Image (cartoon, grey):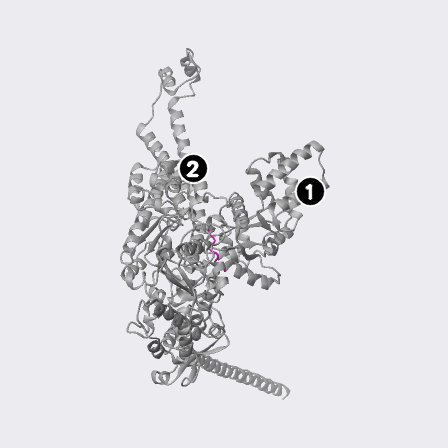
Amino acid sequence: QQGIPAIQRLHSDSQLLIDPGSLSRDEYLAALPIQQVSQLKQLGVALFFILYSAESREDEAVASAQRIGTLFHLITGSEAVELRESRLIEQYHPQQQRESFEAALGERLQPYALQQPAERNEAVTQQTPMAVRHLGHSDDALNNGYQNLSRFWDQTGVLYRDGLEALQSVDPFIATGQIPPLSSTFNNHSNQSATLPQFNAASCSGCGECWSHCPDSAIGATSLTPSQLLEAGMKMGGADALRPHLSKLSKVLSTLTESGPSDQLIQQGWTTLMEQAPLAEERRATADEAVATLCKNLGSLPVAHTQPLFHQLEAKKPQAGELLALVINPDSCKGCGICTTLCAIEAEKQGAEVAALTQQHSDTSALNTHYNQWRSWEQLPDTSSNTLIEFGARPEIGALTATLLSRYAAMAVAGGDHAEPGSGEKLVVRQLLGITEYRQQPLVQQQLQELETLYKQLMEGIREQLAAASHIDDLAALAEGLDDLSNRNLTLSTLAEKTAGIESEGIDAYALKEWIELAEAINQEQQQIAAGDQSLGRARYSLAFASGTAATWAGTFPFNPFQVPVTIGSAAEIGALASGLMEGQLEQATTTHRLIHKAKNLLKNGAQAERKEMDRLTWRDLSDDEQQQCAPLLLIGNDTTLGAAASGGLSWLLNSDLPIKVIVLAEMDLGFAGESGLHGANHRHSDARSELALAALAQRNAYVAQSSIANPEHLNHAMREALQYNGPALLRIHAPSPQRHGFASDQTLAQANRAVTSRAFPLFRYSPDLPGVFGTRITLEGNTTEPDTIASWAFHEQRFAGLFTALDGDKGPTPLEQWITLDSRGQNNKTPTCTVDDGEYAIDSDFARRLGQLLQQWQMLQELAGVVTPFTEQVQQQAETRIAASHQAEVDALKQAHQQELQTLREQLEDEVTTRITGQLSALVESYSDTH
């Protein structure tokens, strides 16, 4: 499904060796893009396949030997290089697989006779891209040639869609180096994959895993009530006769629970309604015709009755349940298989017999069905804000999944680009831009409402000034001046002439001019923010890509997948470029707030000197809420381009107060990228790029987070907190690459999850805004409490395959977790091992040390966050000692107080006894004296 890269560089004498991986030869050819099969057939390329043996499919080391042996067999057979087979066999290492290498070297391969595939696209209806249909009617775009999407589509896009880019004529607009927004929608991927996901609405649980994890925005999802579905079909035209029955029909649809195509659902509801409340024959005929038109408008658009969106909402309140409409865009889908893999997992959890999404053969009929469904989905309303909030509050769903149920967030990055199928980079960028778009939209609307209110108040003030100067209360004089009018139409100049004799104090022209100019400026600013040059409005954020792997698909001419301004620069200059762009954006935002401040001051009758002083207002003078309305800039690169190549610029950015959000797409090669890095002179035991997030923590004043697509909630929290923070931020996010890292395209999320659960890529967030000291501002939430072995992540990536060998007589096999705790001498006498997929493997010692460094980073994070530190026991002992001493002091004080109290009581008792005895003796003496 990923195709054969650089096929255009092949010629008729070329020999092409294909590694089908886990697929058979027939399975690989079935998944190969039809366009490439045709090209290979036309070129007459000699096609060879590596036919893996049963042993090699179970042992990667044997497979590697067979792969290399087959390659050298073709090289020696072509006589391009003189190589002796005996010499090759003698030099091959490791020796355990020498027999497999020799067998593959001596095998006599025959070229595969490729058959010409059947053409399928002749009957496929060619579609005008969505961006052209929705943005091609902008009047402003017609006046701006280089940004005119319709012109770009007619002169360039159609050529690239039809494979006729060689016919591109000289275009002065191309010399500007600018590409209109969303031009990647011109690209058509439907002929590059033999399969497409097929949606089975009856099996859908509404989990949202598919649409939230599609890297290419190829899955459109919307939640809407039956009433909204009917209204959308009505707006497509021709069904107005059904409007009197719309409310009753929507009530009936709310009682149906069968998922499936919209037209069948509506027809079933209408039949039920007519059985319950039949119409007269004439009215019934008209209504039936309107229902047929409505069903035709919506077509086979699939809708599902899911538990979270329909059944549970319907149980709380009748007619509150919403249908989930889900469609596939063939132009964007690359057949990576992520959605169907996730759906199969969800089906297993739910105990469903069939998954909601399954891979089906893509023929002409299927393509046309998908296109029609996508066109219908485009015309549906967006999911309501209340639904998104309630849906995202469910713990099994999550905020990120709900966010991407909004069309504006989900389509923040369009499909059609040249990113690899299953690209982790593309998925990261899509999710982060979706979060950003969803967060910025309400802020923009809030500012637009404020501008609209101020504009109305200013216009009312202008009218009051004009009315006060016209003395309209002198009605007699006005009537006299209008007596001799010859025409009923009265212009302002004529009115002024006829009423010139009326006494008036006049108008302060300078004051009125200020009101008018300010009102006009605010109106223009409002229009620019709301619509802009492309009817997209002023960008809610902007992007800057550092040169690297992400820039190759983000900036490939003529496919621009973004709807916001994008700049691509070299690693050395990207920091300065980003800061300059950010300063420009902040000045633009500050200009808007200057107008707002001036308008508020003018409406309060403030002094003109105060308003002139506001011209000096800078971004730093704005309030926190006003700064939040400024569009952020996202600087995107990888560990290399934003690491050593731009470390100085990055440090300066993180120490500034500019709201630049740095997105680092982590490759995690650990310094072992490529065969030359395994045992050669360029091998690195430590790769500082993997500590980029930890280095950013040292800046202390920037928001820093390390997150992953494996944990959507953590990623959502990190990005929202970074946007909320008014200063700079750095997010380092693991971005697995199927092609570069070596795994199947549908395993991108699985690999990301292995990196997190094995502690190879731990999650953390640091916010300078939190109270307390440095350590208390770090949170390690999101990490699993039961980690997997760190070797499991690396083992499942082919780029590290040479670092794991089957355990066979190695010296002192020791589990990796124990081996890394040994000293250097102990490590040299032992072999680090791991148990993965029920197999025992020895690990390259240098690589094992690097994995140990990753675990040390996790230990350091725990220490910084105060979770686990080497001083815990000492602090605990000191605390216990202090508590014991304090307790003893309290006991001693109590004893002393008790003894003092006893002494006082003893003295009081002695005094009382003495007094009592004395009194009694005195009484006896007196009694004795009286008797004698």
Q: Nearer the viewer, residue 688 or 480?
A: 688
Q: Quadrant of the C terminus?
A: bottom right
Q: Nearer the viewer, residue 426 or 421?
A: 421
Question: Few, some or many C-alpha atoms within 10 Å of disc 1 (few <14, some 14-19, many ≥20)?
Answer: some
Dot 1 amino acid type: Thr
Q: Secondary structure at mark 2?
A: loop
Question: Few, some or many C-alpha atoms within 10 Å of disc 2 (few <14, some 14-19, many ≥20)?
Answer: some
Secondary structure character of the magenta stretch overall: loop
* Total numbered circles: 2
Q: Is residue 532 visible?
A: no
- Where is 251 relative to 84, above or below? above
Q: Nearer the viewer, residue 858 or 405?
A: 405
Res. 271 mark: 1
Res. 137 mark: 2
Q: Which range is magenta?
A: 332-337
Q: Secondary structure at mark 1?
A: helix
Q: Residue at x 46, y 48 (%)?
A: 408
Residue 58 placement (x, y as % from top left)? 48, 74
Res. 503 mark: none
- Where is 79 relative to 817, above or below? above
Q: In the drawing, does residue 672 fall left or right of residue 382?
A: left
Q: Earlier in the sequence, mark 2 or mark 1?
A: 2
Q: Residue at x 46, y 44 (%)?
A: 130
Is 163 in the magenta?
A: no
Q: Residue at x 41, y 15 (%)?
A: 477
Q: Quadrant of residue 809?
A: bottom left
Is 334 in the magenta?
A: yes
Dot 2 amino acid type: His
Labelled pair 2, 1 in contact (Cβ < 8 Å): no
